[in-house]
Amino acid sequence: MAYETLLTTLEDGVFTITLNRPGKLNAFTEQLLHELLAAFREAEANPAARVIVLTGAGRGFCAGQDLAAAVESGAGSADFSYSQHLVNSYNPLILMMRALPKPIIGAINGVAAGAGMSLALACDLRLTAESASFVQAFVKVGLIPDSGSTWLLPRLVGAARALELMLTGRRVGSAEALTLGLVNQVIPDADFTATVARYAAELANAPTATLGLIKQAAEFALTSTLEQSLFKEAELQDVAGRTADHMEGVIAFLQKRPATFQGR
Ligand code: LHQ
């Protein structure tokens, strides 16, 4: 599919989505939000796409809502509904990412601010360039964190740290982000593209259906009791146990050779 505000590629199982409004640090417009949702749907539907890499063009990852576009569409005026804007455009995107049964690597190449930080948090993994940073920018424009930040951030860094970042809106550099548990890895800028590609290739050759089930079980556990999670694990293990990749993994182990997973 062709997009105007995104670039997409599919190569060797890796579906890469690049937010492409570099002059505005890839800030969200209505069109970008809708195209991004469509691109995730495309990646989900295509069995050849086994891992998704989400990144930004230029020096930013995503600066959140394009504030100029928001004002143009009436933000701040009495008849503009923030809630409708969120419910129609942002919420479906975040929910889609969390439910998508394939791993999403956030390749955080630069600043992630406001809803752009929420977008980074909704990825399954965050590989971060040394020069990248994170900003809960909402408070700086008199808004509360949205697009999942109030739910996702405390689960990654703990309630006290999350609240501090949300209340102050201070910029967190990559080294601190790693210490906080906000990101999985910090990579020198010069090695960023190659390291992300290696990581993605590894996941593209993993048992894709099982990765989807792991995501589902982990997400379920976040809001469940131990007992509920034990039963969910048992239910989903039945599904994993019937995949061709499960048998391939077992046979490969017994034959002392590397497994060749087909993703099903
Ligand atoms: C931008 C933006 C931007 C437009 C950089 N918009 N142009 C949901 C529901 C409805 C409405 C409201 O919002 C939401 C959710 C949200 O996301 S609220 C939070 C919105 N985001 C922000 O408040 C972040 C605003 N941006 C910044 O604070 C800075 O740009 C950061 C810290 C991200 C980066 O700073 P710098 O590295 O110093 O870059 P810069 O400020 O020079 O930006 C570069 C260009 O990008 C510049 O344009 P220009 O034409 O002057 O070169 C900025 O105006 C533009 N830009 N963010 N969100």
Image (tube, rainbow, N blue to C red):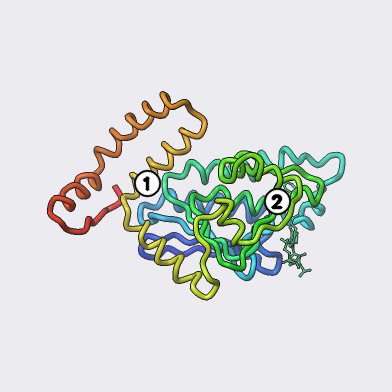
Lower position in the chain sequence, tag 1 or tag 2: 2
Instruction: Farthest residue to the left: give it.
Output: 255
Q: Position of residue 112 (x, y in %)?
A: 64, 58
Q: Is residue 136 left or right of residue 120?
A: right
Res. 88 visible in picture: no
Residue 109, numbered circle: none
For the point 29% across and 39% down, the residue is 240
| The residue carrying mark 2 has its beta carbon less than 8 Å from ligand 1 | no
- Type of the residue with mark 1: Leu
Does 124 sit above or below residue 228?
below
Q: Secondary structure at mark 1?
A: helix
The foreground one among 144 and 54 is: 144
Q: Residue at x 59, y 51 (%)?
A: 180
Residue appearing at x 22%, y 49% in the figure: 249
**In this figure, which residue is indicated by the disc labeled 2?**
136
The amino acid sitting under disc 2 is Gln
Using the rendered image of the protein, determine whether residue 94 is visible from the camera's viewpoint.
yes
Q: Which residue is mark 1?
A: 211
For label 1, count other residues whose C-alpha is less than 10 Å away and answer few (under 14), some (14-19) or many (20+).
Answer: some
Cα separation between marks 1 and 2: 30 Å
Q: State yes or no: Cβ of the residue under disc 1 lies below 8 Å from any atom of ligand 1.
A: no
